[in-house]
Image (cartoon, rainbow, N blue to C red):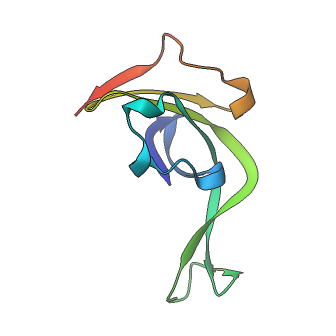
């Protein structure tokens, strides 16, 4: 899951198509990381959860019915992350950062 406070005019939580790479494994050496953002839903025992009843064992799964956009990440230094979002685009339509990219330092 990726949560974005500002994406196409609002805040969203979306899944990553293909679920990789795992953000925990991304390092400075990984270079540019492209995530294509898709819908997700919750399932119980293989069936979509109705979101009304109590359920144990919920599992979030990607629902690849629609690509909402792309987000690029690059760890520039151990504590500096470069980020840019591209709402409405697919991974094949985005080749790299533009001047609109933002830097976040932790």
What residue is rendered at 50% in x and 39% in y? Answer: 10
Q: Is residue 69 above or below residue 20?
A: above
Q: 45 or 30, which is in the foreground?
A: 30
Mark yes or no: residue 105 visible.
yes
What residue is rendered at 74% in x and 29% in y? Answer: 92
Q: 35 or 2, which is in the foreground?
A: 35
Q: 88 or 83, which is in the foreground?
A: 83
Q: Is residue 7 above or below residue 99?
A: below
Give x and y (percent) for residue 74.
44, 29
Residue at the far top in the pictured view = 99
Residue at the far right in the pictured view = 65
Q: Is residue 102 above or below residue 79?
A: above
What residue is rendered at 66% in x and 24% in y? Answer: 94
What residue is rendered at 47% in x and 34% in y? Answer: 30
Residue at the far front in the pictured view = 29
Horizontal arrangement in the rendering, residue 38 relative to residue 57 (left or right): right
Horizontal arrangement in the rendering, residue 27 relative to residue 71 (left or right): left
Horizontal arrangement in the rendering, residue 68 relative to residue 102 (left or right): right
Give x and y (percent) for residue 43.
63, 77
Q: How many marks?
A: 0
Mark yes or no: residue 89 visible.
no
Residue 106: quarter of image: top left
């Amino acid at each position: 899951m990726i949560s974005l406070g500002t994406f196409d005019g609002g805040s969203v939580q979306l899944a990553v198509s293909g679920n990789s790479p795992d953000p925990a494994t991304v390092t400075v050496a990984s270079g540019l990381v492209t995530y294509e953002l898709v819908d997700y839903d919750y399932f119980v025992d293989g069936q979509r959860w109705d979101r009304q009843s109590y359920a144990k064992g919920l599992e979030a799964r990607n629902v690849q019915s629609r690509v909402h956009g792309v987000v690029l990440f690059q760890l520039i230094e151990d504590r500096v992350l470069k980020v840019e979002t591209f709402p409405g685009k697919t991974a094949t339509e985005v080749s790299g950062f533009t001047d609109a990219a933002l830097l976040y330092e932790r």
